Amino acid sequence: MLERIGNCRIVDEVASGGMAVVYRAIQDSLNRTVAIKALKTSAAAEPHIVTRFEREAQSLANLQHENIIHVYDYIEERGALFIVMEYVEGIDLYDLLERCGRIPYDVAAIIAMQVARALDYIHYRGIIHRDIKPANIMIARQGGVKLMDFGIARDKTYGADLTDAGTGIGTPSYMSPEQILGDKLDARSDIFSLGIVLYQMCTGRKPFVEDEQKSVMHKIRLEKYESPRKLNPDIPRELERIMAKCMQKLPRDRYRSAQDLVMALERFLAKHVEMNYHARLVLFLKNQDIITQLEADEYLNPAVGGPAGAPLTPQARAARQVVRRGLQFQATVVALLAFVVGLIHLAPIGKSPRAAELAAAPPPAGRLVFHAYPWARLHIDGKLAAVTPVARPIEVPAGEHDVVVENDFFEPVERRLYVPPGESVDLVVDFEKRGTRR
């Protein structure tokens, strides 16, 4: 093993892949721990791999985001190539899933949201990652999430892509349908891959798994995945809908941008997590014995821990419990007073017939705006609902519906749609563009 690279002293090897080795090292000039990614000699003999390695370093060096690994330096030494980067002490998502099977849905949503923030940042700068998967997502011991390995990312600032047209590149189980076909990719391809990761975190298995009859690539392009709530009934329907929108077969049916996905996850988390998101991850890591109780106290209570970040003393912990019990008592008293005041105001009045009608009324229906080219029959939940042309929106009960669009000369289109109460949802099917004739 190497002893020094530049001004860095090698400590040990932490990972090894097909093209590179990663070392943990100490950068003497700043006395900090760093990670060094070294291109293997066999890979360095391939010019296109060397170019990708150089581009990875240059692309990452221009990115400064809390959810992306930072690059410090790029070194050419003794005929070898090295990237000096931020060292994150923690566990990658692949190893975490190997350890615990599946992750609580709120923790999974927090991780996905932080990855989506990283994607929104790079997409805005013209970069597509193309290899979103658990092994490239790092969970720091302090509760942060970092996106890693931009080795096959496409950066528009370099002009021509190193991947030949019609060639799929990435990890098959996490590739989008258009990535498998070798089509031109945009940001929505990364969104599909992140949807797969979110599904796997919540259920403990991938949505598309090859079998003796069909490959994983065939299933990603043409097959439906099993409902995540069948595998884990604890998953809220709202989160299931987020996964479904991410994993739509056609890019136009997914979230338009990673920012839209971030906003959807933020709305979900606002209802389900009532604490700092980093703190929630720290508590989860502690419960999985990845960090100790002392570490968790240090990360969660830096102000109480003093300058050295020491854990809470028994006295401080007891004082915090006293304060917490006092706040709980005050909240109970306030709630009781509010209840009594409400009875005083409402008891003499009673419930009006109009109020009773409103209480008993079902939630407002939604509307489906349907267009098909050249024409089609629309089935909703197994029943014929319309034949185009349709002059006005179709009123449907709010909620999820299985939709089948049929034309005698083309393969049918099947989708699962969510129709919000009182809102309209567009469904447009162009059979001629799809080109899938019977």
Image (cartoon, rainbow, N blue to C red):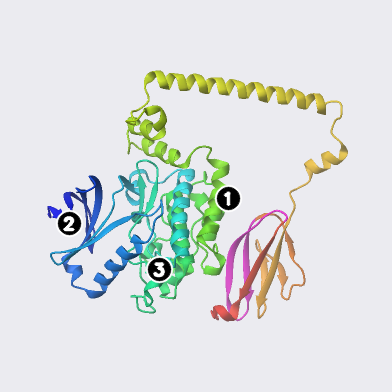
Q: Residue 258 at x, y = what percent?
A: 50, 60
Q: Which label was assigned to residue 238?
A: 1
> Given this view, does label 1 or label 3 mark the residue nearer the observer?
1
Quarter holding the N terminus is: bottom left
Residue 163: name its quadrant. Answer: bottom left
Residue that badge 3 annotates: 217
Q: Are marks 1 and 3 in contact (CB under 8 Å)?
A: no
Say which element carries label 2: loop
Q: Residue 342 at x, y = what percent?
A: 77, 27
Give the spatial CA distance, label 2 vs label 3: 43 Å
Q: Residue 33 at x, y = what percent?
A: 24, 46
Sequence-wise, the earlier of marks 1 and 2 is: 2
Residue that badge 2 annotates: 6
Quarter holding the C terminus is: bottom right
Q: Is residue 412 inside the magenta stretch?
A: yes
Q: Is residue 276 above or below residue 170?
A: above
